[in-house]
Every structure is written in C-alpha cells, then in structure tokens.
Amino acid sequence: MFRRIFKNFSKDIGIDLGTANILVYVKDQGIVINEPSIVAINNRTEKIVAVGEDAKVMLGKTPQHITVTRPLVDGIISDFEVTEKMIKHFIEKVHRKSFTFMPRPRVIVGIPLDVTEVERKAVEDSVMGAGASEVLLIEEPMAAAIGAGLPIQEASGSMIVDIGGGTTEIAVISLGGVVSWKSLKMAGDKLNEAIVQYARDKFNLLLGERTAEKIKIQIGSVILGEKSVKSIIRGRDLLTGLPKEVQVTDANIREAIIKPIRLIIENIKSTIENTPPELVSDLYEKGMVLSGGGALLKGLDVLIAQETKMPVHITDDPLTAVVRGTGKVLDDLDNLKEILLPSAKDLGLH
C-alpha cells in the first residue's frame, strides 16, 4: 500500500550505465544527467569525495589518500559498492532537482549483450541498493535501436552498431529480438590506449589517458581527409623524465587507431555473415545505423560503408541513443514489455 503511494511521488528513470559516461533519463523530463562514470574516494574515510564531472577533473592529479576510479569496466560492474554509491548519488540528484519526496523510482537499465547471469544480478542488486523500487533490464543495442527510431518489432532486419567507451555492440534485430550479434571489449577506451602506446613507441612520450582522448576527439579520423590537421600533445619525455610537447597530425592518430578499428569492422562483417539471408537483403536495402560516442569518429561511417558495401547512417545525437531508447520504453511499457530481459529473480538467482 505505502509502496504504491510512494511510487506516485517517484519518477521512472532510464539509465545508460556506460563505461565512460552515465546518462539518466527521467520520464516527462528527458535526459537530466550526462556525466563521466568516474568516482573519487577518500581511502582514509571510505567516503565518496566526488562523482562524475567533478571526479574526472581529478584524474591523474590526486594525493595518495584519494583514488579516482571507474567502477565499470567494459560495460560491466567491476566495483559493486562504488557503483551502487554512484547510482545512488545520481538518483538522489534527479529527485533533488524535482523536489520529489522519498525517491523509490522504477529504473530501466541498458546492459551489454554478453553479460553473465551473475553480472546481470550485480546490476540489479546495485540499482536496487541505490534506491530503486523495481529494476528492468534491456540489451544496450536494443535500447540504442529504439533510441535511433528503428522499427525493431517489424518482421524486417535492422542493424545497429553501438560503439561506446568499453564495448562495441553489434546486433541485427527483427521481431523485437536480437537475431545475430557480437559484443566486443574493443571501443573508445581501447582507441585511447592505442594512442598512448603509439606516443610511447613513436615519440618516447608518456601521455595521460585524458590527453589521448582529447586528441582523438580533436583530430582523430579513419580515412584520409582533404587536408592534413595538426595539433600539439604534451606529456612526459620517457628519456629525460621532463615535460615535452610534440606536434602530431591526423595521419599519426589514424596510424595509432586503425588496428582496433579494423577489428571492429571485421566483427561487423562476421555478424552480417551469420545473419539469415532474408534479413541480409533488408540490411543491404536499409543499411546499418551507428550509435555511441565512437560513431562520431571522423570517416568511420564512410570506411564501414566501403568495407561492407552497405549504406551506413549515424543516428542523431549518437551519444544519447541508448538512454533515449530506455526513455521510449518507459513511455510505452505496455507495448515494449516483451523486449525486456527477465530479471535475476525470474531466473532463480535471488
């Protein structure tokens, strides 16, 4: 009885629990939070010092007693307690903004395609522990496809490639279900790592992860542009140990990241090969849709189109496709209930 009353005071929430960013959608309000999935913890007191944007600023700059951590690795919870605290922080922030009394929201969360039942239970438990009254789960590429406006419930093939921070999810969807798919631990973070490694090998320069990400966004591309673009990167000289700056071009960054990009494209091809012929003919007609932050990498859509001989479209605002999809499910739960995953309780894991 009380639970039903309190539920009326709570807002239904959709969460994209990404390795790089956490996005929160509130029913009737839209996306209210888009912050890095980063938490700073005081090791002496075990208390959280900062979350999200405030914590990201501290990366690589903290004293010994403060640890800045990413509680999600490759789209999966690696630190249960910290994830729970982070989600709780964002749920409370949402309700503080809307002055809601006693938050116990119903929460829908996107999870990667290849999570184990134990990892699925960890997501549910951490969201419940953070204050949810009920947790609904949806596969991330399904949420991204809904966010991108694809006709997922029709008897025709739709293909989505969601390139996030920790994982790349490739899925062919038809009749409200995933027909063929691949889930790779190869995405934005691996591109950053490739740039760090390249700077070390080529210039004897030790770069920070944030610097690598910044240069990737600034001048990163996967096909030759009309004119060369240059930028400066700063780090530590591995020979002298002193600060050093180096001028890099888009060709350097392309050389650094092309290997992981090729791997993603090989897996896209492999997913198409494993798709039933009837659906493949739909895909060749309609093409595939790119979502996630990786979709913004210059020239990626063109390169994939060249390699697969298929049309490639980038969805509007690719960074928010998954969380917008969770929002659409919340708005039309009666029609879209079938596409949700069974809970850990239904699978007998509680």
Image (cartoon, helix red, strand yellow):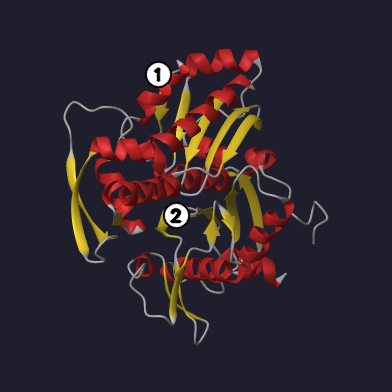
Secondary structure under the numbered disc 2 in the rendered image: loop
Query: Depth check: 147 or 19 in front?
Result: 19
In percent of the image, x 59 and y 62: which residue is there?
78
Tell me the element at label 1.
helix
Kind of residue at badge 1: Gln
Rendered residue at 59%/39% (across/down): 183
What residue is at 34 percent from the left and 48 percent from the top?
Answer: 201
Q: Find the distance from the CA under tag 1 to the CA under tag 2.
A: 29 Å
Residue 270: quadrant of the picture: top right
Q: Nearer the viewer, residue 212 or 235?
A: 235
Which x, y percent locates residue 221? 30, 35
- Furthest residue toward front: 239
What label does residue 345 carry, if any?
A: none
Residue that carries the numbered disc 2 in the rendered image: 20
Q: Which mark is residue 306?
A: 1
Disc with the residue nearer the chain's start (1 vs 2):
2
